[in-house]
Image (spheres, rainbow, N blue to C red):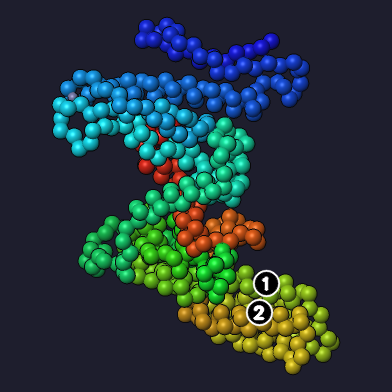
Amino acid sequence: MPLKVQIVFENDAGEPAVVQEVAQIERDVFSPATLGLTLEDAKGILRGLQRHLVTQQIEDYQQQQLTCPDCQQPRRIKDRRKLVYRSLFGKLQLQCDRLFHCDCQPQEKKSLSPLSDLLAERTAPELLYVETKFAALMSFEQSAQLLAEVLPVDEQLNAATVRNHTQQMAERLEAELGEERFMYIDSCEWDIAALPQPDMPLTMGIDGGYVRAIKSQSDPKQPHHFEIITGKSIADDGSSKCFGLVNSYDQKPKRRVFEMLQSQGMQMNQQVTFLSDGGDTVRELQLYLNPQAEHLLDWFHITMRITVMTQIAKGVTFPDDWPDKDIGLTLESIKWYLWHGNVFRALQAIDWLADSLYTEDTPSKHGKLFKKVEEFKTYISNNQPFITNYGERYRNGERIATGFVESTVNQVISKRMVKRQQMRWSQKGAHLLLQVRTKVLDGDWRETFERWYSELAAQAA
Ligand SMILES: [Zn+2]
């Protein structure tokens, strides 16, 4: 039983005017694999439908253009040019009319190409949307492959195209970001006092991570890694937004963070708690953004470090005369002191642990643990002013960490950018991808596209 798929164009009276064949489907055997449409059938039908629909739309549009909008006199066709347009449902070769301007109005140029001007981007907005959304979540290569697998997209859609489109859309986002300022607290105290009662505090977690840099041909001394700063702000109702930036590349880091806080409804009289893993770049970024800010060391980062040391300690065997055989217990007490904000006692215990691990000829595992403990000591000493009584805050229902389940770095950076060792990034490429990725993770990407292409929203409604 051969089946024909046809498209019927009706005239104004609702009668069939033009019938075009879209596809033919034949089935010899009946099996689960031949029941209904195959992916290839579906792609063929979509490709055919798209071609006929577009041809019809283009014909109608260009027909309208033949009349001068000012005097209603006909405009003459100068010539016809080919235009390639890429859509979600295939690459389209369009015949594009160039028309002579009507001389009823003075014109700068002799001719015009209405269709070519209208389709200036040469790629359908929805294709751009889908390409960039996938690229935010998986590699450019995988995104191209996935789209080609399920949709009748252009056969030439490849990783490079997806990367270029992602960068273009990210640059569009970047162009919307306002100027950088040193300080974002510009209201005076009177203005702040006059603001309505704000919502509950916002919590903002800021964190840093590293990705591998592409090898530079011109500069062999260029670092192999560069730093990415990422963060997440959590409102009292649990809703969150994230940001990411390449610190050495970004010209407007504070503006970026400020806008994100604003998008969550931050008022200048609202309390914002910044939680970070310490570090100068991270702390520098969060200053001067809000007059009611408090800055704390994120409890998540403290416990992560203690967990790492506990794991290493489990693999270490100690001789009988070792002073502190139950290192796990000591680490547990350090955690306890820190939980209550008792930095003094915590540092004493860390010191004692470091001393007990130090030997002239440290065996490798002791040595590794010793190094971690020393690092931890520096970390706690440097961040002393930002360590609080976490236990008390916790009992008061205040937030003490942004990532109990998973760190923001892992969510925003690692899963997309360091998953495979061979992934290398330029600073610009990484920064731009992060702009799209954070929008996608926040669930704001479609909305952004609909703001850019309002007809996309109208069609979806
Ligand atoms: Zn005219």
Label 2 vs label 1: CA separation?
Answer: 9 Å
The residue nearer to you, when weighing 251 against 442, is 251
In the structure shown, which secondary structural element does the residue marked by tag 2 occupy? helix
Find out if the beta carbon at label 2 lies less than 8 Å from the nearest ligand 1 atom.
no
Characterize the local packing of mark 2: few (<14), some (14-19) or many (20 or more) Cα atoms within 10 angstroms: some
Q: Where does the N terminus fall, quadrant-wise?
A: top right
Residue drawn at (59%, 25%) of the image: 44
Which quadrant: the C terminus?
Answer: top left
| Residue 238 shows up from this direction | no
Which residue is at the front of the view, 422 or 233? 422
Residue at far right of view: 320
At 46% from the left and 51% from the top, the residue drawn is: 167
Residue at 62% across, 36% down: 149
Check if mark 2's residue and mark 1's residue have beta carbons within 8 Å: yes
Query: x, y (%) of residue 398?
Result: 48, 64
- Left or right: 297 as drawn, with respect to 355: left
Q: Which mark is residue 243?
A: none
Up-down relation of residue 388 to residue 148 (above or below): below
Residue assigned mark 1: 308
